[in-house]
């Protein structure tokens, strides 16, 4: 099927491509997404959206890469403050209780954008340390501009709008009209260019923050693979935090994560154990429900 190059607008392209390639992008028509898409079309030497759609239909490798091209790089500090309050007041104390270790508490911000999310965790930890253990945050993304913003660590006032004033004073200093994270906030965070879908995974994480990425944009096999990769990177009993507008489906809850009892948006890694199937049964995998904090 060939489309008329002139007739295919950006909106039409998104509608068709998202439907054809099992993505959930239509409501995120942001300027940066469009810029990335046009840059990709130029790099491939194609004439426009219709040609690119054609290419996607004929090239599974390019189709697989599409969500990376369409990435949305928007974030802010303390996004959805109630989530962070739950993390600080309920999750972290339980996650750390009974683990008398001096090893660092290891967190991963997967799809960290410009650093607002990993630095928020660092701020929360600095403000009210839940333990003597040092914090280490791995912050990964595929967008080099976002990673540079994170490494620079200086932000417009608007990015800080959900932070309370005392935390702003504690964590930032004003420099050249921008709010720059103080060294105590910056030092636990390490930024790395990493494609969640393809690159080697970190291991043994105590906590993963994965918000407005896998569980917003992906559907079908990509979402399943994404969930599995996050599951693999967590330690047994480790916790996944997702966004307020996101949820895990029945399959993901059955295979990988158990909702933290009574606290929305937090999931505990599920242990999968291979047991010999009972005689006369086809079942081989049994999911065990872990106890939070163990
Ligand atoms: C909407 S932002 C979410 C930022 C932050 N987690 C939050 O909730 O505020 C999604 C981020 O995921 C990143 N991303 C998209 N595809 C990725 C991939 N395959 N691997 C790693 N990061 C990716 C984007 O570059 C973007 O910075």
Image (tube, helix red, strand yellow):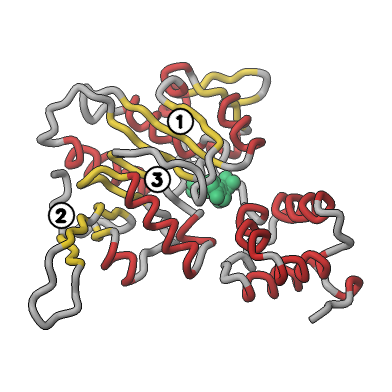
Instruction: Single out the mark in the foreground, 1 or 2.
Output: 2
Earlier sequence position, callout 1 versus callout 2:
1
Which of 69 and 1 lies nearest the eye of the viewer?
Answer: 1
Q: Which mark is residue 165?
A: 1
The answer, for residue 162, to whether it is visible in the render is yes
Q: Nearer the viewer, residue 283 or 118?
A: 283
Residue for point 24% across, 60% down: 258
Q: Which mark is residue 290?
A: 2
Query: Is the CB of mark 3 within 8 Å of ligand 1?
Result: yes
Q: Give the structural element (helix, strand or loop) at label 3.
A: strand
Q: Please indicate whether residue 202 sits to the left or right of residue 176 in the image.
A: left
Q: Which residue is mark 3?
A: 209
Q: Secondary structure at mark 2?
A: loop
Which of the two labelled residues, at mark 2 and mark 3, occupies the earlier sequence position?
A: 3
- For numbered disc 1, what is the local secondary structure? helix
Q: Position of residue 41 (x, y in %)?
A: 80, 56
The answer to whether marks 2 and 3 mark residues whose Cβ atoms lie closer than 8 Å is no
Quadrant of the rendered image containing residue 285: bottom left
Separation of disc 3 and disc 1 at Cα?
A: 24 Å
Given this view, does label 3 or label 1 mark the residue nearer the observer? 3
Q: Residue 88, image x and y in percent?
A: 28, 39
Q: Residue at x 24, y 53 (%)?
A: 268
Q: Is residue 102 above or below residue 140?
A: above
Residue 20: mark in rendering: none
Q: Residues within 10 Å of mark 3 (few under 14, many from 20)?
A: many
Mark 1 crowdedness (10 Å alpha carbons): few <14, some 14-19, many ≥20 = few
**Residue 179 makes an appearance in the image:** no
Callout 2 environment at 10 Å: few (<14), some (14 to 19), or many (20+)? some
């Amino acid at each position: 099927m060939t489309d008329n190059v002139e007739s295919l607008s950006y909106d039409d392209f998104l509608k068709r491509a998202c439907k054809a390639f099992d993505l959930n992008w239509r409501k995120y028509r942001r300027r940066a997404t469009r810029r990335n898409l046009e840059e990709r079309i130029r790099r491939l030497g194609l004439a426009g959206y219709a040609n690119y759609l054609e290419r996607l239909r004929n090239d599974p490798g390019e189709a697989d890469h599409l969500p990376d091209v369409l990435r949305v790089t928007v974030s802010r500090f303390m996004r959805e403050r109630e989530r962070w309050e739950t993390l600080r007041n309920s999750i972290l104390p339980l996650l750390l209780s009974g683990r008398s270790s001096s090893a660092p508490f290891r967190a991963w911000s997967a799809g960290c954008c410009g650093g607002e999310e990993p630095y928020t965790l660092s701020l929360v930890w600095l403000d009210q340390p839940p333990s003597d253990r040092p914090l280490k945050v791995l912050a990964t993304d595929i967008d080099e501009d976002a990673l540079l913003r994170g490494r620079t660590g200086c932000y417009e006032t608007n990015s800080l709008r959900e932070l309370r004033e005392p935390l702003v004073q504690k964590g930032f200093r004003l420099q050249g009209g921008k709010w720059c994270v103080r060294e105590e906030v910056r030092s636990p965070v390490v930024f790395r260019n990493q494609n969640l879908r393809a690159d080697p995974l970190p291991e043994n994480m105590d906590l993963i923050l994965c918000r407005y990425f896998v569980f917003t944009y992906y559907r079908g096999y990509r979402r399943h693979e994404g969930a599995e990769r996050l599951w693999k990177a967590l330690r047994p009993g480790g916790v996944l935090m997702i966004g307020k507008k996101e949820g895990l489906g029945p399959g993901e809850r059955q295979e990988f994560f158990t909702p933290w009892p009574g606290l929305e948006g937090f999931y505990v890694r599920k242990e999968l154990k291979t047991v010999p199937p009972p005689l006369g049964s086809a079942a081989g995998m049994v999911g065990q429900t872990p106890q939070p904090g163990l």
